[in-house]
Image (cartoon, rainbow, N blue to C red):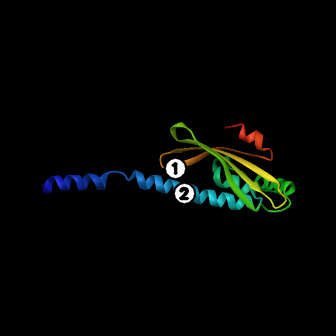
Amino acid sequence: MFRLLAVILASALLMPNTGGAQTNLRTQFNEGLANFNELVMQRKIGDAIDLIRTDLNMSADERQAINTQMQQFFEEDFIGFATVRSQALKNGFRQELLSYWTADGEYLYIYIFMHARENRRKVLDIKYDLDFHDLNALF
């Protein structure tokens, strides 16, 4: 009896905790999304893209050029944001459509395509546009 209990306990301790890994992945994603949203709300789109697409290796000048472009389109910071669409695809792929708006009723839409694997989520593509229909058509 005690030998069986010892085997069960040892097995439980040695098995990977996939529930914790999924929770940790979700927590990391939510924290990253909060940081991303904070930058977008301040019209720092270049910095936001650099935050979640580190593989692009954008220079400071490239980030600033995107930020300047957004600041020309939108004269004031965004006051709200929401997830417009979210779709889980097969094999860990997911797509999100986010919306940000100003007090004047101007909107920015951001499309994010990502893949979760090996306990991490990688953003594979990000697009932004002022036209909802262009990005909504990706679903």
Q: Which comes sooner in the sequence, label 1 or label 2?
A: 2
Residue 7, x across and y down, in percent: 20, 52
**Residue 28 — which label?**
2
Specify the amino acid type for callout 1: Arg
Residue occupying the point 46% across, 52% down: 22
Residue 15, x across and y down, in percent: 32, 51
117 is higher (above) or lower (below) than 59: above
SS at mark 1 in the image: strand
Neighbour tally class for label 1: few under 14, some 14-19, many 20 plus, Cα within 10 Å:
some
Q: CA distance from mark 1 to mark 2?
A: 8 Å
Q: Are marks 1 and 2 in contact (CB under 8 Å)?
A: yes
Viewer-nearest residue: 116 or 83: 83
Residue 91, x across and y down, in percent: 51, 38
Q: Quadrant of the N terminus?
A: bottom left
Residue occupying the point 69% across, 62% down: 38
103 is higher (above) or lower (below) than 136: below
134 is higher (above) or lower (below) than 31: above
Q: Is residue 111 left or right of residue 106?
A: left
Q: Is residue 85 left or right of residue 75?
A: left
SS at mark 2 in the image: helix
Report which quarter residue 46 is drawn in. bottom right
**Residue 129 — which label?**
none
Residue 132, x across and y down, in percent: 77, 44
Q: Quadrant of the C terminus?
A: top right
Residue occupying the point 54% across, 57% down: 28
Residue that carries the numbered disc 1 in the rendered image: 120
Viewer-nearest residue: 132 or 48: 132
